[in-house]
Image (spheres, grey):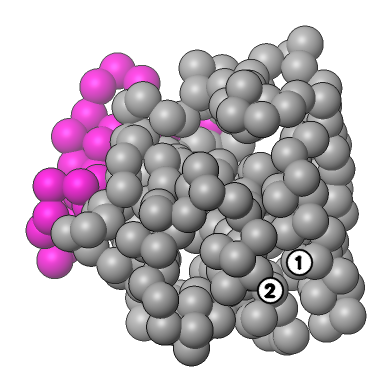
Amino acid sequence: MAASATETAQTKTIAYGTDSLQDLDFTRARGVSGPAPLIVFVHGGGWKRGSKDNATGRYKAAHFTNEGYAFTTINYRLVPDATVEQQAQDVADALAALLARAKDLGIAPGKVVLMGHSAGAHLVALVGTDPQYLHRAGLSYAAIAGVVPIDGAAYDVPRQIVQGGRFMHATYVQAFGEDAARQRALSPTVHAPAPNATAFLLLHVQREDGIAQARELETALRKAGTQVERREFAGRGLRGHAEINRELGNPDYPATAVVDAWLRRILR
């Protein structure tokens, strides 16, 4: 369907599909006269919960728009009513809807960064390594300048299901099923051989499974010749996992300066 929109003084809400969860909030860059780079944020929630309204974090939109970037946070369909494959397609379709309106929205072509936390980190990493989702949306990796997965732990799905412990086991099985071939097909690390998005910045806190998964993805991307950086920050367990998402964009939080510097390098 053609994207439709409603607008407030600062934020435009755009529907990119017919489902009530297929919508996004777009905020223009501040102080930019011409087209601006775009950051697209994908929320977490175990693939089955969360929304752009409660899982984006309070600082991101204001911080990144003040830095001269347009900022979007998207909703996507949720498990069990949708599959993870459909969720990844929603990410690509949301981007396509934005780029179809790039002139009106003031988006700079080719200067888009996908950013996601937790399950959203998995989804942006998957879209950034498996080109089928962008292709179905009529796009290619030329549309994406970089990908920022934040504290994900499902880049290698079969390994995470085996090694991730009991706490999230049922969530992983609900999302990815028990078929090993499907699990591998939904694993960014498996798809890391080129082609990929141009650059990745992998962020994580001190969670054992998150560290292992990020290191494995980093190694696979490097082997493929993809530009990748991995940065780790303080914070343990679910508290640290939530904090990095909640605080990113806060000038006093260490990851904010790291992301800002990386964005300046790849979007210059």
Residue holding disc 2? 189
Residue 40 screen position, x and y as percent: 50, 47
Pick the residue in front: 188 or 263.
188
- Rate crowding at label 1 as few (under 14), some (14 to 19) or many (20 or more) other CA atoms within 10 Å: many
Could you say which quadrant of the image residue 238 lies in? Answer: top right
Q: CA distance from mark 1 to mark 2?
A: 5 Å
Compared across the picture, whether 79 is left or right of 226 comes to left
Q: Residue sitting at 12 percent across and 55 percent down? A: 19
Say if residue 91 shows up in the picture.
Answer: no
User: What residue range appears in magenta?
Assistant: 1-30
Residue 243, image x and y in percent?
Answer: 63, 22
Label ID, residue 217: 1
Would you place residue 75 above or below residue 17 in this image? above
Name the amino acid type tagged 1.
Leu
Please identify the quarter of the rendering in which residue 85 is found.
bottom left
Q: In the image, is residue 8 part of the stretch drawn in magenta?
A: yes
Label pair 1/2, CB-CB below 8 angstroms: yes
Q: Quadrant of residue 83?
A: bottom left
